[in-house]
Image: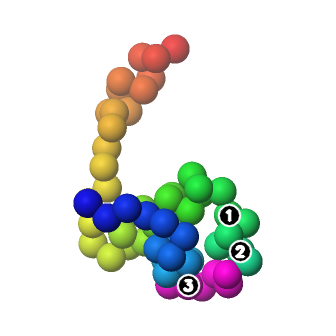
Amino acid sequence: MIRLNTTWYLYYGRKLGMNEHEVLACPLGRMLDYMACMQIENGADQKVYAELDELANIR
């Protein structure tokens, strides 16, 4: 498993068109979301954690 560090964030940020300052200022969760969207765009399967009916029953 690859451990994501600052170098990987800069790499993915550059692929997304962000400059170094934007990547370093971006919150971790948002950067991971951007990376997941990029992976889905490139053919990865989206992980579904719950069905719509299950989410509706939470209330």
Q: CA distance from mark 1 to mark 3?
A: 13 Å
- Residue type, label 3: Arg
Q: Residue at x 72, y 66 (%)?
A: 25
Tell me: 53 left or right of 45: right
Secondary element type, mark 1: loop
Q: Is mark 2 in CB contact (under 8 Å) with mark 3?
A: no
User: Could you tell me which residue is drawn at 56 percent across and 62 percent down?
Assistant: 31
Viewer-nearest residue: 50 or 12:
12
For label 3, the SS is: helix
In the rendered image, which residue does mark 1 sit on?
Answer: 26
Total marks placed: 3
Taking 12 as reference, is 28 above or below it?
Answer: above
Q: Are marks 2 and 1 in contact (CB under 8 Å)?
A: yes
Q: Which mark is residue 22?
A: 2
Residue at image point 50% right, 59% down:
32
Q: Nearer the viewer, residue 33 or 21?
A: 21
Residue 31 lies within the magenta run: no
Task: Specify how the rendered protein is coloured.
Answer: rainbow
Magenta-colored span? 14-20
Residue 2 screen position, x and y as percent: 31, 64
**Mark 2 or mark 3, earlier in chain:** 3
Q: Position of residue 45 (x, y in %)?
A: 26, 60
Distance CA(mark 2)–CA(mark 3): 10 Å
Residue type at the position of mark 1: Cys
Q: Is residue 16 visible?
A: no
Residue receiving disc 3: 14
